Amino acid sequence: MKLPCIPAIPASEITPRELFYQRRHFMQLALGGSAALLAGTAVGGEKLASSLSEAYGLTDKLTPLEDVSQYNNFYEFDTSKEGPAKMAGRLKTRPWTVSVEGEVRKPKQFAIEDLLKLAPMQERIYRLRCVEAWSMVIPWLGYPLAELLKQVEPTSEARYVEFVSLHDPEQLPGQRRAVLEWPYREGLRIDEAMHPLALLSFGLYGEVLPNQNGAPVRIVVPWKYGFKSAKSIVKIRLLKQQPTSSWMHAGPSEYGFYANVNPEVDHPRWSQAKERRLGEFLKRPTLPFNGYAEQVAGLYAGMDLTKNF
Amino acid sequence: MNWKTLEDTHLRHLKALVFLLALLPLALLLTAAWQDNLGANPIEKITHNTGYWTLTFLLISLGVTPLRQLSGASWLVRLRRMLGLFAFFYACLHFLTYLVLDQFFDWSAIAKDILKRPYITVGFAAFVLLIPLAVTSTNAMQRRLGGKNWKRLHRLVYLIATAGVVHFAWLVKKDLSRPLLFAGILALLLVLRWINKLKVARLSRSYSTV
C-alpha cells in the first residue's frame, strides 16, 4: 500500500502549541474587548491580574465578550436573555461578604476583598454548556473552590456543599416574581466541590465579573449544565444531607441534583444530544461531561447516570 | 358617513394598509438581521419571533368575529381572510427557520423531534392543519366546498390556535407568563363567541314562539 506523501516541515517552522495558543488568545481578547467598547456594554471594567493556567487552556475559539455579557440566564434580574445586562446596574457588589458555615471546624465570614487575595488568581478557559442546548467558551478568572473550603476545615460529616445566592428584590427585581424559589440555591457533593476543575470565579476576560455574569463571586463547574454554577453567592453551607436546589424544587422530573452534561440523557422535553455553540451555524455533538470526562468521570464510577441525572 | 359600513374604495385602501402593517414584523426582523442586531443567538431569536407573530395573527384573526359582533362593524369580516393567511405566512417562516436554520435538514433529528418531543409534535400538527385552511381560503374553493362544509373545515382554527398556545407553553423552561397571556386572550375570544351563540339561540327561540 502506498502512503500519501507528507511534506517534510522542519520542527523549527512549527509554532509551539503554547505560543500559538497564547497568540490566538491574545488576539481574541483584543477583539472581544474592542467589541465590548464599541457596543458600550456595562461591564465592570476593573482589571483583575491573573496568570493563564496552561493546564486549563483550550483550543476552542473563545465566545466574544459581547455575547458572554449580553446573553445571560440570570432569573434574579429577568427571564429574558437580554434583560440581565440591562438590569444589572442595580446590583451593588461592595460591601459583600460570603459566609462559610455548617459542618466545618472554622466557620467564617469572608469579606470579598479577602476572598480576592485568598489564593493566586488563575485564568482558565472552560466550555459552558447550558441545559437549553447552547454553549459558550469563556476565559474565567479565579481559583479552585477547594482553596476556600480548606480554610474552614470541613468535618468528616460534611458530605455536601450548598451555595446560596443573594436574595434582595430591591437589587434583583426578578425576585419579585416567584419564578423560582428564592434565594437561588445550588449544591455539589463534597468530592465534586473539592475537584480541581471546580472554580471559585471573580472575573472573566481579564476583568472583574460583569454583574449579569454573577458578580462579585460565583462558582463555575464546567462539566455540569450551566445552572449548577451559582452566581452572586453570599453563603456556602457544608451539609450532611443532600440539599434541594432551586431547579430541583421547580421541576423534580426535569432537573436532578447532579445535572452532569450528558448527551445520552435527554431533558424530558428536548434532546441533549447536540448543542449550538454560539457563533456557529451547525449544531455540534455534545460531549459526555462537556468534554471533561477524563478528569471527572471517576467521581461517578458505578452510578446509574440515567437515574442520577 | 356611518363607520359601521364601508365603501369598497375605502375597504381597498384599508386592506392595503393592513397588508403593509402585517408585513412590518418581517421587515423589522430582516432589518435587525441586516444590521447584525439579533443578539448572541440569532437562530433562536428568529425562531421565537416568527412563532410569536404566528400566534399573534391567529389570535387577531380569531378576534375579528367577536369584534364585529360587539361593534356592529360588518366590514371587519372582509379583513379576516388576509389576517388568517398572514398567520399561515408566519407559520411557514417559523417552520422553515426550524427546518433550515435550526436543524439544517437533519431529517433524522427532525423525525425524532416530531415523534418524541410533545411540544414539537403539537406545533407541527398545528402547522399541518393550517395548510388545508390556507388552500381553501379562495372564493372558488369556498364555492366548491359549499358554505356548510367550508365552515365546518375552518372550525379547525380553534384547535390550531389551542395547539399553538400549548406548543408555546410546553417549550418555555420556567417562566409561563407569555404563554399564559396568549392562553388568556384565546379563552376570552372563545367565551365571547360562546356568549354570542347563546344570545342568537335565545333570539331565534323567542322568534319561533311568536
Image (cartoon, coloured by chain):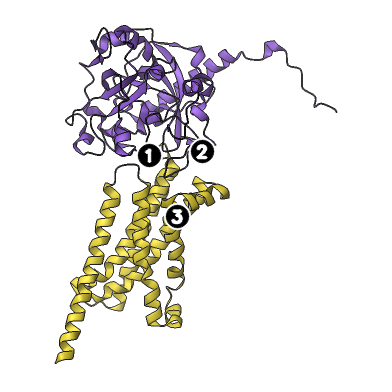
Chain colours: A purple, B yellow
Q: Are marks 3 and 1 on the same chain?
A: no
Q: Are marks 2 and 1 in contact (CB under 8 Å)?
A: no
Image coordinates of residue A170 in percent, x first then y, are 16, 30
Q: Are marks 2 and 3 in contact (CB under 8 Å)?
A: no
- Amino acid carrying label 2: it is Lys
Q: Which residue is mark 1?
A: A254
- Amino acid carrying label 1: it is Glu
Q: Are marks 2 and 3 on the same chain?
A: no
At x 23% / y 75%, what residue is drawn? Answer: B197
Q: Residues within 10 Å of mark 2 (few under 14, many from 20)?
A: some
As measured in the structure, the alpha-carbon distance from the residue carrying label 3 to the one carrying label 1 is 19 Å
As measured in the structure, the alpha-carbon distance from the residue carrying label 2 to the one carrying label 1 is 18 Å
A113 lies above or below A258: above
Q: In this rendering, does residue A65 appear at all?
A: yes
B207 with respect to A121 (left or right): left
Residue B121 is marked as: 3
Q: Nearer the viewer, residue B206 or A9?
A: B206
At x 51% / y 38%, what residue is drawn? Answer: A274
- Amino acid carrying label 3: it is Thr
Front: mark 2 or 3: 3
As measured in the structure, the alpha-carbon distance from the residue carrying label 2 to the one carrying label 3 is 19 Å
For label 1, the SS is loop
Front: mark 3 or 1: 1
Q: Nearer the viewer, residue A157 or B33?
A: A157
Report the residue that reaches farthest toward the right.
A1
Chain ID at mark 1 = A
For label 3, the SS is helix
Q: Residues within 10 Å of mark 1 (few under 14, many from 20)?
A: some
Image coordinates of residue A288 in percent, x first then y, are 51, 30
